[in-house]
Image (spheres, rainbow, N blue to C red):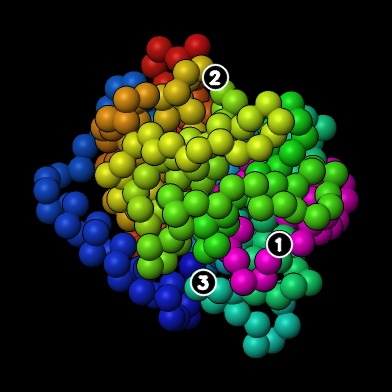
Amino acid sequence: MPTSMTGARTTLLATAAAVALALSAQGPATAATAPLSDVRVVAHLNMADGQRPENITLEPDGSADVTFAFSRQVARITPDGRTHVLATLPAPPAGSATPVLTAPFLGGIVRAHDGTLYFLYATGTTDLTGVWRLRSGGTPQRIAALPADGVPNGLALDRHSGLLYIADSLQGTVWRVPSTGGRPTAWAAAPELAPAGFLGANGIKIHDGAAWVSNLDQGTVLRIPIGRDGTAGRVETRATGLAGIDDIAFADGGNTLLVALNAASEVALVKPDGSHTTVLSAADGLENPTSLAVRGTTAYVASGAYVTNDDPNLLTARIEGSE
């Protein structure tokens, strides 16, 4: 984040730093732990240019498309570590402020089969906040407006229905909108999705007939069944005690998760019974990881270095035993 960031975002930094210090006092960082191995840093990003990755989606060739949270940019990082800016979103009018975060914020990003990218932009203004689309060779276009007093953060695409699911970190709501665009609907809202002082619902994935959502403030992983008629079922808490949880990704064909623990600079493996262990740490190069993606036997982890303020990066690790 920019060094000039003030207000609530600065408060988060102080809180996160305190958590990180407390965790580091428990013992030295450890290198990759099974089932992860063979960690490789793909790219060290340019912090001076605002290259702090917030979310990630993958291209067929192994490139990673990322949102740079506070520089209003969508970029592609190639397997050999080169970074290409794909689009820069318009700046909001002077004096505008994104709720809680203050600065304009680019959040979740997903890729459709045809290469179209969808991503979330929050500015605190009605004309820019919402879901944006970028087609290959085109320019970014907003396809759905979202409440200007919210913070759309995590984004997931249900490839079967063509619907986009949006985790709003401030309103404690999961919105849903067709990938073709249109008016969003409040698909799920519950206390389990709400913030508890800063930001609530954060990362989101569609998996096994449900929306899986992390809650940063509450340190939880939630599962919301998608009914046959498309409606949201009862919110289920599947894991707790995950302080500073950001994004989530499924590590295999089942319900085992990898989760990014931002403040602690760790990635944890969460088993279906909710138990969790650290599998990557700062010793592997993590600096406040913000997002994950998994393809086959490879896990991608993006670090924003929001607290460490040192080396935002993208790394990969091998998942042993994954199919």
Q: For the residue carrying disc 1, how many other residues have a C-alpha within 10 Å: few (<14), some (14-19), or many (20+)?
A: many
Judged left or right of residue 182, residue 258 is left
Q: Earlier in the sequence, mark 2 or mark 1?
A: 1
- Secondary structure of the residue carrying tag 3 is loop
Q: Residue at x 70, y 75 (%)?
A: 125
In the rendered view, tell whether residue 135 sits above or below residue 159. Answer: below
Write down the quadrant of residue 157 in the picture.
top right
Residue 145: image x %, image y %? 76, 62
Asked if the stretch drawn in magenta spans residue 151, the answer is yes
Q: Name the mark on residue 146.
A: 1
Asked if the stretch drawn in magenta spans residue 139, the answer is yes
Q: Which residues are magenta?
A: 131-156
Q: Residue at x 55, y 62 (%)?
A: 171
Q: Earlier in the sequence, mark 3 or mark 2?
A: 3
Judged left or right of residue 174, residue 24 is left
Residue 193: image x %, image y %? 47, 52
Query: What residue would you read off at disc 2?
Result: 296
Q: Name the mark on residue 101.
A: 3
Q: Name the mark on residue 157.
A: none
Residue 132 vs residue 312, the one in the foreground: 132
Q: For the residue carrying disc 3, how many other residues have a C-alpha within 10 Å: few (<14), some (14-19), or many (20+)?
A: many
Q: Nearer the viewer, mark 3 or mark 2?
A: 3
